[in-house]
């Protein structure tokens, strides 16, 4: 039975339209372009926005795709929202649930600003229970991956497979592996950025990786994340993102900025996620030290997969730690940056679909 607090948002019109301002674009208005970009044609899967109200009156929001109940649950990184998965879901072609983690997208901001994996997992568990979703293939990118570890450990009945996308827990100081562990060093560790914890523990003295077009460096991510908070229009945000190395192009950035910002009552624009409105120290804290998650990750008896972006943030030491601590886990590399779901949606969807077919004890 579906939770009585589960609701579907209405299709209310934008109040500003009556005040002479253009209506804000519908959140699904970019789907035809997304479908064209990934080459699936014009047939879009069924989709709807769903909300569940928790006992503390906080709302957890998500996008449900295709068949119900969903088979795959997708958890984004810090500073993103459920729409980061749109292109991947279009390629996936199975029932899916893309969640807005607390403090992001249409989900409620927390007064204590605790957006760590533990609190996030509690919210996701309530959402899945409210949807009677059953065991899920959980795909978590960055902060969403750390959240997935906690979810699988604390609610094993809800997770049949776990896929970590360009993230592992923090490697404790002084612990490292030889360079032959994993493919070439892509740099990595640092604080939380727009796509989540941008790496869990760079080797002391490691050089900052060079900028790659469309893939900003860690320093650029940090500065963009904790910088300007209000803008005259969305074009200013796109211009600033381009200046900080984001990409791959203006069209893609316009889509992402539109879906991750809102118009204020004074007509200016701001990011929807709470992290952009916090002091830098608090904003960057969500996944800074996650080394305690190695133990629950290693104890999982379900299939576990790590997907590493070659231009992402998981370095050789982290790959080595994963292989040593999770010997039953698999590692796959894709030619992408940290936000694999945006850089390589079709390849990611193929991997998720195939991995989800592996036998699981759940």
Image: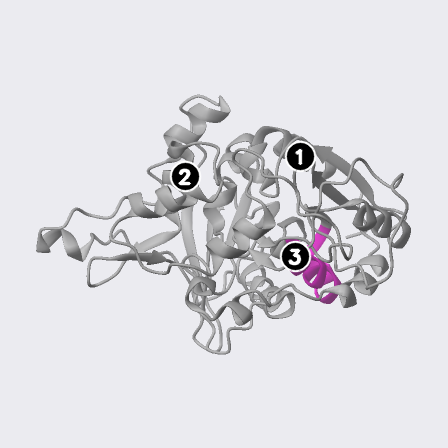
Residue 138: say if magenta. Answer: no
For the question of whether residue 354 can be seen, the reply is: no
SS for tag 2?
helix
Residue 339: quadrant of the picture: top right
Q: Position of residue 47 (x, y in %)?
A: 43, 42
Residue at the spot of label 2: 253
Which of the marked residues, 3 or 2, is nearer the chain's N terminus?
3
How many other residues sit within 10 Å of disc 2, few (<14), some (14-19) or many (≥20)? many
Mark identifier at residue 190: 3
Q: Which secondary structure class fits the magenta region best?
A: helix
Q: Going 86% across and 62% down the picture, which residue do you hit?
A: 174
Viewer-nearest residue: 162 or 340? 340
Residue 184: quadrant of the picture: top right
Mark identifier at residue 23: none
Q: Point out the frontmost of discs 3 and 1.
A: 3
Which of the marked residues, 1 or 2, is nearer the chain's N terminus?
2
The region drawn magenta spans 145-160
Which of the marked residues, 3 or 1, is nearer the chain's N terminus?
3
Q: Going 81% across and 63% down the picture, which residue do you hit?
A: 172
Residue at the spot of label 1: 353
Q: Position of residue 171 (x, y in %)?
A: 80, 59
How many other residues sit within 10 Å of disc 3, few (<14), some (14-19) or many (≥20)? many
- Residue 88 vertical position relative to residue 134 in the rendered view, above or below: above
Residue 158: say if magenta. Answer: yes
């Amino acid at each position: 039975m579906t939770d009585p607090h589960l609701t579907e948002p209405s299709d209310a019109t934008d109040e500003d339209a009556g005040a002479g301002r253009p209506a804000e674009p519908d959140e699904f208005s970019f789907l035809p372009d997304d479908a064209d970009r990934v080459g699936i044609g014009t047939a879009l899967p069924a989709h709807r926005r769903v909300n569940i109200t928790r006992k503390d009156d906080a709302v957890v929001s998500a996008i449900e795709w295709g068949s119900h109940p969903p088979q795959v649950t997708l958890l984004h990184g810090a500073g993103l929202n459920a729409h980061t998965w749109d292109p991947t879901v279009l390629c996936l072609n199975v029932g899916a649930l893309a969640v807005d983690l607390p403090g992001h997208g249409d989900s409620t901001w927390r007064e204590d600003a605790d957006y760590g994996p533990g609190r996030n997992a509690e919210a996701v568990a309530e959402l899945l229970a409210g949807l009677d979703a059953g065991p899920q293939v959980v795909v978590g990118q960055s902060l969403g991956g750390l959240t997935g570890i906690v979810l699988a450990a604390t609610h094993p009945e809800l997770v049949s497979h776990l896929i970590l996308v360009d993230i592992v827990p923090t490697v404790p100081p002084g612990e490292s592996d030889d360079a032959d562990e994993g493919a070439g060093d892509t740099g990595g560790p640092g604080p939380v950025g727009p796509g989540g914890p941008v790496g869990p523990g760079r080797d002391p003295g490691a050089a900052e990786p060079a900028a790659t077009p469309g893939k900003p460096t860690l320093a650029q991510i940090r500065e963009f994340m904790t910088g300007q908070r209000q803008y005259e229009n969305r074009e200013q945000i796109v211009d600033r993102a381009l200046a900080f190395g984001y990409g791959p192009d203006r069209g893609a950035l316009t889509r992402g900025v539109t879906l991750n910002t809102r118009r204020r009552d004074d007509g200016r624009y701001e990011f929807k996620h709470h992290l952009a409105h916090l002091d830098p120290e608090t904003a960057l804290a969500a996944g800074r030290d996650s080394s305690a998650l190695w133990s629950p990750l290693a104890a999982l008896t379900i299939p576990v997969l790590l997907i590493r972006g070659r231009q992402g943030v998981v370095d050789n030491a982290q790959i080595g730690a994963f292989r040593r601590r999770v010997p039953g886990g698999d590692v796959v590399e894709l030619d992408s940056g940290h936000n694999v779901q945006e850089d390589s949606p079709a390849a990611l969807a193929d991997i998720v679909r195939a991995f989800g077919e592996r036998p699981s004890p759940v």
